[in-house]
Amino acid sequence: QKEVEQDPGPLSVPEGAIVSLNCTYSNSAFQYFMWYRQYSRKGPELLMYTYSSGNKEDGRFTAQVDKSSKYISLFIRDSQPSDSATYLCAMVSGNTPLVFGKGTRLSVIA
Amino acid sequence: DAGITQSPRHKVTETGTPVTLRCHQTENHRYMYWYRQDPGHGLRLIHYSYGVKDTDKGEVSDGYSVSRSKTEDFLLTLESATSSQTSVYFCASSLQGTSGRVNTQYFGPGTRLTVL
């Protein structure tokens, strides 16, 4: 079992929809949880990060962590065609390198 | 891309030839990383560096070596390229390591390598 599982999609939604992207993980030591966004033929860029459990909101984006279920989510409200990208979750414990999910490819159709 | 460049951006080479990819950052970041990204596998860490001349292996280090003689440069070498090393290679850098804290890694634009 991989440490981090992420459905690769692709996920296709109409403009304005609420998008839910998710990752599950097996290592209970993970403390920091991140979401990266990667546009086609570009490098990933950090979108949001959350420490431990709880929610964090930034504009149309909300990151949610449920450590009891080892489950993290990224919600996108009022999705736009410009949100079309691959979204990668990442997490870390202690002084170890980030562990990435495989990424979910999202298409928002106008 | 936070001042991270990669060269070359595209390369086609033949099996058995040596290949060196270069990563250059202007952020004075201490940590630098090399990843490969393949369909169905996501981002996988090859090697990373936590200072000049200080490097360590990642998840998929076999067949790769790295060198860091200056803070700003991190080289990835495929001593004898194989077709299984066809991939997109990303370099990243960060000011700090993880150390239990959020680690904002800034990624370069990637190098597409094809080994025939």
Image (cartoon, grey):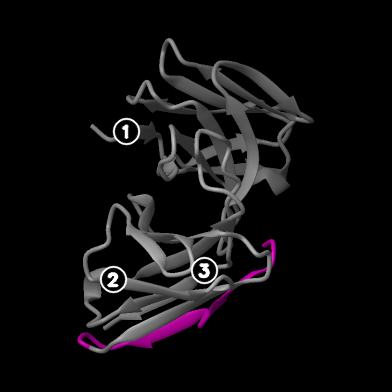
Provide the chain ID for the residue under circle 2.
B
For mark 1, what is the residue?
A: A3
The magenta segment is B1-16
**Considering the numbered disc 2 on the image, is that residue within a helix, a strand or a loop?**
strand
- Which residue is depicted at the point 23% across and 71% down? B63
Q: Residues within 10 Å of mark 1 (few under 14, many from 20)?
A: few
Image height of A85 relative to A53, above or below: below
Provide the chain ID for the residue under circle 1.
A
- Which residue is depicted at the point 28% across and 35% down? A2
Tag shown at residue B64 = 2
Q: Where's the N terminus of chain A, which quadrant?
A: top left
- Quadrant of the image occupied by residue B103: top right
- Quadrant of the image occupied by residue B16: bottom left
Q: Is residue A70 magenta?
A: no
Depth check: A66 or B46 in front?
B46
Q: CA distance from mark 3 to mark 1?
A: 25 Å
Q: Is residue B7 magenta?
A: yes
- Which residue is depicted at the point 58% across and 49% down? B96
Q: Are dots 3 and 1 in contact, CB under 8 Å?
A: no
**Considering the numbered disc 3 on the image, is that residue within a helix, a strand or a loop?**
loop
For mark 3, what is the residue?
A: B110
Q: Are dots 3 and 2 in contact, CB under 8 Å?
A: no
Residue A41 drawn at (x, y percent)? 55, 64
Amino acid carrying mark 1 in the image? Glu
Amino acid carrying mark 2 in the image? Tyr
